[in-house]
Image: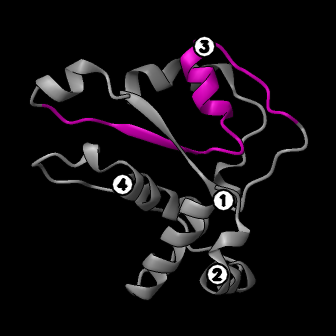
Amino acid sequence: TLPERWQSEPMVVRVGVVALNLPVMAESYEAGAPVDAEPERTTIADGLAIRVAIPLAVERLHAAIDGIIRVSERAIAEALVACHDAGVEVEPAAAAAVAAVRERPDLTGDGVVVAMMTGRNFDPAVLERARRDPGSFAD
């Protein structure tokens, strides 16, 4: 649930996005201190595959963002396909921003949404699997 102030104050809301399978930075942000990942967890979003939170990064998150959203592997895969179909060739970690907006329409309100997307290092096999069988990714 979004904090009440996000809904009542006209402002820019800065939201981080993590893979649901590897929520180390979200858990660390919420705990206010680094939290380690479960070793067996993986994500197709290599750029979000953080296993050890750096204390300084966790500290700075509180000044940099207003909250964090977790997105599933399937949501990332579907967003990856949507980005590529739109001519935006990004990697799964970048597509996670689109996945967050698609899964959380309450983020858009009546304002403008800016999704920061960086990274074009994608595996064509992952893209093809996402296109052919998005249900094969964890929800």
Amino acid under disc 3: Ala
Q: Is residue 120 magenta?
A: no
Instruction: Give coordinates of residue 122: x percent, y percent.
Output: 65, 76
Q: CA distance from mark 3 to mark 4?
A: 24 Å
Q: CA distance from mark 2 to mark 1?
A: 12 Å
**Label located before the other in sequence (4 or 2):** 4
Q: Which residue is mark 3?
A: 31
Q: Which residue is mark 1?
A: 45
Q: Is residue 76 left or right of residue 107?
A: right
C-beta proximity under 8 Å, tags 3 and 4? no
Amino acid under disc 4: Val
Stretch in magenta: 11-38
Amino acid under disc 1: Ala
- Name the residue rendered at 48%, 26% in the picture: 61
| Disc marking residue 127 | 2
Q: Is residue 24 magenta?
A: yes
Q: Indicate the secondary structure of the residue bearing disc 2.
A: helix
- Name the residue rendered at 14%, 31% in the picture: 11
Q: CA distance from mark 1 to mark 3?
A: 23 Å
Q: Which residue is mark 4?
A: 101
Q: Nearer the viewer, mark 3 or mark 4?
A: 4
Q: Indicate the secondary structure of the residue bearing disc 4.
A: helix
Instruction: Give coordinates of residue 72: x percent, y percent.
Output: 60, 52
Specify few, some or many for label 4: CA neighbours under 10 Å numbering under 14, 14-19, or 20 or more.
some
Specify few, some or many for label 3: CA neighbours under 10 Å numbering under 14, 14-19, or 20 or more.
few
Q: CA distance from mark 4 to mark 2?
A: 20 Å
**Label located before the other in sequence (3 or 2):** 3
- Name the residue rendered at 73%, 70% in the picture: 136
